[in-house]
Amino acid sequence: MSGSPVVEYTGVRELRGPLVVVEGVSGVGWDEFATIAVGSGERRHGLVLEVDRDLAVVQVLEDTAGMDRTRTRVAFSGAPLRVPVGAGWLGRVCDGRGEPADGGPPVLGATDAAVGGTPINPVRREPPNEPVLTGVAAVDVLTTLVRGQKLPVFSAAGLPHLELAVQIAAQAACGGEPFAVVFAGMGLTHADAAFVRAGLAERSAARDLVLLLNTADDPVIERLLTPRIALTVAEHLAFTEGRHVLVVMTDMTAYSEALREVSAARGEIPARRAYPGYLYSDLASLYERCGRIRGRPGSVTVLPVLTMPAGDITHPVPDLTGYITEGQIVLSAEAQAAGTYPPVDPLASLSRLMRKGAGAGRTRADHPDVAAQLIAALARSRQVRELADLIGRSALSPTDLRHLDLEDAFRERFLAQGMTESRSLDESLDRAWEVLLTLPRSQLGMLPADLLDARRPPPAGDADGAGTP
C-alpha cells in the first residue's frame, strides 16, 4: 500500500450514536480500520462494522459528538486495526485504545499485530498443566489457576471484585519463570482507575505489567477494543517472547453492555435481555485466545471478572461465560457481610483444570487430597448449620458441633486474608491442615492414613481418633 493515494469519502449519509454511515464506497471490507477527518481538523479513528453494496457502517472509537455530517471525510486503510507489539508495552499505562496515559511517548514495537488476533490451531494446543500461584489462599488451594486456563470471577455489586483482581494481578507468579500481567479495566470510575494504578504501581515499576484503563466516561466503542488490545499484546509476550502471561479483564459485564449499546445503534434484533444474539460467540472470541501452543514458549491465562446484575447467575453474561470457561470463582455476599475478605464461596467455586496443575511436582503432593477433604468438610458443615437453625445447637451431636467449629476456623484462619497479604502455597496448605484437624480423625476419610499420621498420629486405644482434640 505504500505510495498508493489515500481516497477520502465525503458521502456521510448519517451520524447515529457512535456510528457513521458512509455511502458511495467501493473495495471496503468488514473490520477495516478507518481514519475520520472532522471539519475542525481533528482526526478520529474507526472500524468498519458492516458493508452493504456501496454503504459502509463505521464505529467511531472517539464517538461522533461534535461531528458535522457535511464536513466529515472518511479514509479506509484496506486492513484491520493493528497495534505495535513487544516488550515496549511493559511498565506502561495506557487508555482503552492503547494511547499513553502515563505522560510517556507512544508505545512502539519492532512489529505489529492485528487486534482481532488469529485462532490457535486446536491440534497444536497443549493441555494446561502448571499452576499460576496468586498468593490468595482460597484460590491457590481450592480453585488452583492453571497456565493456559480461563477462570472467571463471578461477583455482584458491592463485593470487592476489583480489590481481588488487583491483588491477584499484583501477587501472581509462576515459580521464577518469566512472567507478566496484562490488566484491562473496562468502564471503571476514575476513583477505581486510580485504585488500580496505585495497587499495581510496584509491579508496573518492575516492568512486568501492562495496564489498559477504559473509564466510564470514555467512548463506549473503546470498551470493545480494550480486551482485544490486551490479548494481542499478551499473545506476543507469551508466544514470541516466551513469558507466561496472566490477562485480568474487568468488568466483562461493562464490556457486554457496551456491545449491547452498539448493537442497538445498528438496529439489530435483540436476544435475551436485549443483548445481541452473537454475545456468546463474541465472548468466546476473547476467552478462547488463552492457552499454550505446542513448540512455542510461554502461555496466556485469562482471569475475566464480571458482576452479576442483582446477583443473578442465570443472567446472560455469567451464564454464557460459564459455558465457555473452565470453572468459576464465586464471591459471596454472606461472607462479605461477615467481614471476611476475600469473600469467596468455596462450595460454589470450581477450577475444572485444577487436577492438571496441582499435586506432586507441581504444587505439593498433599494438595489435591487436602483440597478435596476441605470442600467435603465444608459441605457437611453447611448442612449442620442449616440443621442447627432448625433444631438448635443443643440437639447436635459432638461431631456435628466439631463441624460448626470447622466452619468458623475456615473463615477465620484460612479464608480471611489482607488485601496486600501474599501467602505462599506452603503456608496456605498448612492453614488448611490446621482447619481440617479441628475435626476428629474419623471424619477425615478422604485423606490417606500416612498423611494423617504425619500430621496427627492416632491416639493409643482409639483407632478412629474419635474424640481427639
Image (cartoon, helix red, strand yellow):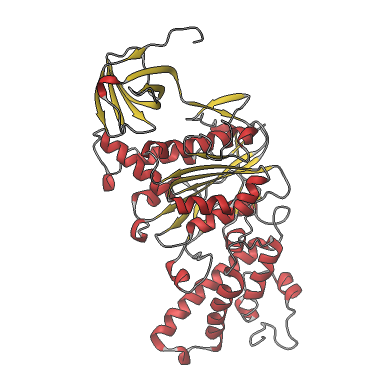
- State the image coordinates of residue 351 (x, y, percent, origin top left): 54, 55
Residue at the location (25% across, 35% down)? 268
Above or below — where is 105 with respect to 425? above
Quadrant position of residue 302: top right
Dividing the picture into quadrants, the one containing residue 446 is bottom right
Residue 117 shows up from this direction? yes
Give the side of residue 104 with respect to residue 268, left or right. Answer: right
Of the pair 85 and 155, the residue shown nearer to us: 85
Query: Image check: 463 left or right of 165?
Result: right
Q: Is the C terminus in the top left, top right, bottom left or bottom right quadrant?
A: bottom right
Tell me where residue 117 appears, x and y as whole percent. Answer: 50, 30
Tell me if 297 is positioned left or right of 151 in this view: right
**Front one among 250 and 125:** 250
- The tally of labels here is 0
Q: Residue at x 73, y 74 (%)?
A: 455
Relative to the observer, which residue lies in front, 329 or 230? 230
User: Residue 101, image x and y in percent?
Assistant: 52, 39
Q: Is residue 189 above or below residue 375?
A: above
Q: Is residue 456 left or right of residue 354?
A: right
Q: Give the residue drawn at x 48%, y 36%.
A: 228
Choose top left, top right, bottom left or bottom right for residue 36: top left
Point out residue 436 in the picture as x, y percentages from the top left corner.
63, 74
Q: Residue furthest bottom?
A: 394
* Residue 329 seen from this side: no
Q: Nearer the viewer, residue 449 or 182?
A: 182
Position of 235 relative to 57 (above/below): below
